[in-house]
Amino acid sequence: MSIRTNALAAFASLSLLAIGWGITQPLAQASNDDVPSASSGTTTDPDASAGGPSDEESGQQSSPDPQSSGSDTESTTDAATYADGTYTGSVTSNEFGQWQVSVTIAGGQITDVQAQTSANDHHSERINQQAVPMLREEVLEAQSADVDFVSGATLTSDSYLTSLQSALDEARQ
Amino acid sequence: MSAPPTLHGGHFEAMGTVVSLAAPAPLPAGRQKALAAEFERLEALFSMYRPDSEAARVGRGTLDVRDASDEYRDALQLALDWQQATDGAFTPFAPDGTVDLTGVVKALAVESAAGLLVDVPDWSVNVGGDALVAGRAGGRPWVAGIVDPFDRGRLLTKCVLDEHRAVATSGVAERGEHVWRRDEHFAQVSVVADDIVTADVLATAILAGGPATLDLAVARWPVAVIAIARDGAIRATDAFRRAA
């Protein structure tokens, strides 16, 4: 999982916590929050905070949690009863490091969210990279013997019969 | 180069294509059958080629989308969210306004299959080019080959599915998937991503939207992409570069 996925997961759990507290005011965006892909193994939303139609009430930004498909934001108690200050969620850990999310409340509204992590950004794919021109001879080569399966334009059941994938499948039972 | 791992597998027809399974150990008894049944269930719900499916009925207008199942409506909402996120390059709407969810259904089926394999540590599921893996292929990471669009009997390149687990390829010769193209630039686009919906949608979006969508996709999502133009020109992210 990417750094952003982990941050979103931690953020999401804090969001659900915030919703449980009855804090449903619009969330301020983190400063360089782009459009991440949040994956938790089920249906994936691109990023609900990208704006546009939302089925939350009063135009509130949806949570980036892909599993909260709009049904879990209900106003309960008055958020103004919560004292101003910064609330820090519990630390979660995974194989990449530790994560902790802090929420700042001022005037009864969430005004800031910060995610901190100990994970190193060693991932090879980064957001904001480029797809550059490459000559064929510069592209990573492959032989059928190197690969476990084949991805191409969608096969029909007919074109499958003469495909590289079918040759691989033949060898396996 | 080490010898390729011995893999067990099976395949079956579903959704107009073929589902290929592979794993270093045989799947538990009955599991392939359960996967086939789940694909059949989803096809009955979403296929535009089955007049009684919810998707076909919504498309014809004989079923109001508000009366459709939660599963259908969730899929529609997902497609609409992606339409937004890709600035319209991906869309569940045909030019005549009818709803067609084939752009997400295959990916959702792969995710459903993953849900039926949670107790299996190492596996790969390839639904006609949309593939998701878990674990390793017996001692090394899973490797996906990318077909050469100009010679389908050959591989253009490959990607190691170590950090990113999903790969999807969109191309000009697609059956049933109405890739409503605004731009005729690319012949084939492959996307490697953390999840199969992202990979599938972005591959479709880039094929439909052209170079501008390619730039948007790599700027906004942590993905690897290789896009081949109709004239053979290639644009790719660093993961597809041959080692020096």
Image (spheres, grey):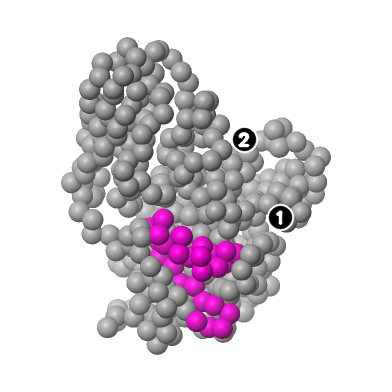
Position of A120 compared to A143: left or right?
A: left
Q: Earlier in the sequence, mark 1 or mark 2?
A: 2
Up the image or down, A62 lies above or below A135; here it is above
Amino acid type of the residue that numbered disc 1 sits on in the rendered structure: Ala
Q: Name the residue nearer the viewer: B20 or B9.
A: B20
Q: Name the residue nearer the viewer: B40 or B109.
A: B109
Q: Name the residue nearer the viewer: B183 or A76.
A: B183
Q: Say few, some or many: other residues with alpha carbon within 10 Å of mark 1 (under 14 / 14 to 19 / 20 or more).
A: few
Membership of A47 in magenta stretch: no
Q: Position of residue B192 (x, y in %)?
A: 43, 63
Q: Classify mark 1: helix, strand or loop.
A: loop
Range drawn in magenta: B206-233
Q: Say few, some or many: other residues with alpha carbon within 10 Å of mark 2 (under 14 / 14 to 19 / 20 or more).
A: few
Q: Could one spot residue B133 in this view of the protein?
A: no
Q: Residue at x 42, y 49 (%)?
A: A35
Whole-number angstrom distance, CA of label 1 to CA of label 2: 22 Å
Q: Which mark is residue B70?
A: 2
Q: Are marks 1 and 2 in contact (CB under 8 Å)?
A: no
Q: Name the residue nearer the viewer: B178 or B41.
A: B178
Callout 1: chain: B
Q: Residue at x 68, y 45 (%)?
A: B45
Quarter of the rendering containing residue B162 = bottom left
Q: Which mark is residue B94?
A: 1
Q: Position of residue B211 (x, y in %)?
A: 51, 69
Q: Classify mark 2: helix, strand or loop.
A: helix
